[in-house]
Every structure is written in C-alpha cells, then in structure tokens.
Image: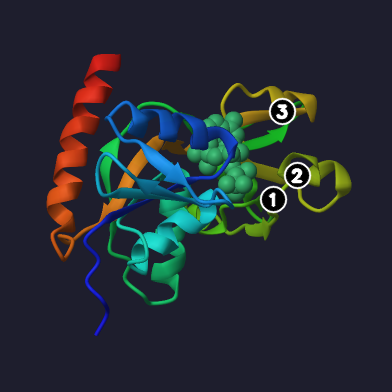
Amino acid sequence: PAQPRDRLRVAIQKSGRLGEPARELLASCGLTWRESRDKLFCYGESLPVDLLLVRDDDIPGLIADGVCDMGIVGRNVLVEHDLARRAQGRGADLTEWRQLGWGTCRLDVAIDEDQEWTGPEQLAGMRIATSYPHTLGRWLEEHGVDAEPVLLNGSVEIAPRLGQADVVCDLVSTGGTLRANQLKPVTTILHSEAVIAGPGHPLDDGRQEIADLLLRRLDGAVQLKE
Ligand code: ATP
Ligand code: ZN
C-alpha cells in the first residue's frame, strides 16, 4: 500500500504567465517555503503545503495520478486534458475548485484578415492549426463541421503562412500576435482563466483538512483583491 501522505502538494507553473501570480497568491495566504536546490520543489514551512514547480501541461496529469493534490492552471489546459483522457476511455476525475479571475484569455478560431467570416460551416474541409485538438474537435462536432485539426505545439500563428494549415485555433488575449500574422479572430470556442484544479473526490490522510484551510484563506485573499 502507498505510504500515507500528510502534507498537501500543490502544482504550479515553474515559469510562464501563471507561475509568478500563482506563487504570489499562495504567499498572500501566509505560506512560506524553503526551496530545493533545483528549485523544482518548495517545502512548506508555515503550513504543511509543498509546491511542485512544473510545466503547465503536466499539472492536470499530476493531479489525476494523485501525485499532487491541487494545482493552479489555465482552464484551457484542464479542459484539453479532460477531453483527451475521455477520448482514451479513461474518466478523469478533475474539477475546477475555484476560478481565480486572472490569466484570462480566449481560445479563438482566426482566419486570414482579408477573408470574410460567414460562420462555422466555412471551416468545412479546412486544416486548422492548434495546440488544443480535443477542445477544437468538440466544438467542430457541436457545429457539425468536418475539418482537420493539425496539432502544433508552438508557432501556431505562422502555420497558414508556412502552408501547414488554412486557419488557426489559438489562445488570444490582446490579439496582437494574430494581427502580426495577418490573422483575425472570428469566433471563440473557450473562455479561459486561471483556476484551482483538484480531484472531484475528497483527499485522503487528513489532506482534505489542509486543503479546506488553504481554500478558506484563498477565498479571503481573492476577496481582498476585488
Ligand atoms: P510551459 O512552459 O509551462 O509549458 P506555456 O508556454 O505552455 O508554459 P504560457 O505561455 O506561460 O504557457 O501560458 C500559460 C497560460 O496562460 C495559458 O495556458 C493560458 O491559460 C494563459 N494565458 C493568458 N493569456 C494568454 C495568451 N495571450 N497566450 C497564451 N496563454 C495565455
Ligand atoms: Zn505549456
């Protein structure tokens, strides 16, 4: 049997857009840590709450596998992971415990800025470059459109110019990157923000109590900011 784990383990992004605000939010709850030499693990000093610093894409899997108890991640990453797992016939037991109201962005379909947008049907038969094939696939299905997601893990916006795809489906906040690539957003398939993700069932070994305490403090900290 697995060893009991009586400390809460929270996964956050190591760097990138959500890492710093996530750490600040947790620090505003009175948490302090001692960093490991490789800076991938932070041992909680004021509360038994440790941090694991990882790539955002790894956060849902770490929670689903029980390696971490909760995480701070974009809804876009959580939804894509959930749909990917379902596609493999594995029910993912992950939910949004809280919505944090920052890290907001949209997953948008964007087309050539000179083209007219008439609606989803227009995408029939097209190659759509995206890092979110399952989220896009669900939207296409809902709209009865038969198109071909082309999976790219970076540089999605230049795919049309490179001839790899006809249009793109990517994260947008200001639209600056799209404009720089002569693309314009035409429809939103997901509204995203940073969320606290955790399992849909209570935690074991007394960790739920620690999680509840942390969530109460988080709620207070989020309210103070509003
Ligand atoms: P990692 O190295 O951890 O894999 P990443 O490059 O995949 O990082 P970031 O660019 O740091 O990820 O974005 C993290 C999250 O920030 C996104 O998943 C999304 O939820 C949010 N976000 C907010 N605005 C934007 C934006 N304009 N473009 C991309 N992501 C955004
Ligand atoms: Zn990532």
> Residue, x 35% and y 30% (percent of image)?
27
Q: Is residue 169 left or right of residue 159?
A: left
The relative height of residue 68 versus residue 2 in the rendered view (above or below) is: above
Q: Classify the position of the N terminus by image quarter.
A: bottom left
The relative height of residue 13 versus residue 57 in the rendered view (above or below) is: above
Name the image quarter holding residue 44: top left
Residue 226 visible at all: no
Q: Is residue 66 left or right of residue 110?
A: left
- How packed mark 2 is, by other alpha carbons closer than 10 Å (few <14, some 14-19, many 20 or more), is few
- Sequence-wise, the earlier of marks 3 and 2 is 2
Q: Is residue 18 left or right of residue 68?
A: right
The numbered disc on residue 155 is 2
Q: Position of residue 30 (x, y in %)?
A: 27, 30
Q: Position of residue 50 (x, y in %)?
A: 35, 50
Mark 1 vs mark 2: in front:
2
> What amino acid is labelled 1 in the image?
Ala
> Residue, x 74% and y 27% (percent of image)?
113
Furthest residue to the bottom?
1
> Residue, x 30% and y 57% (percent of image)?
69
Label 1 secondary element: strand
> What amino acid is labelled 2 in the image?
Ser
Name the image quarter holding residue 201: bottom left
Name the image quarter holding residue 5: bottom left
Q: Which residue is mark 3?
A: 177
Q: Is mark 3 within 8 Å of ligand 1?
A: yes
- Sequence-wise, the earlier of marks 1 and 2 is 1
CA–CA distance in space, label 3 to label 2: 10 Å
Label 2 secondary element: loop
Q: Position of residue 116 (x, y in %)?
A: 68, 29
- Sequence-wise, the earlier of marks 1 and 3 is 1
> What amino acid is labelled 3 in the image?
Thr
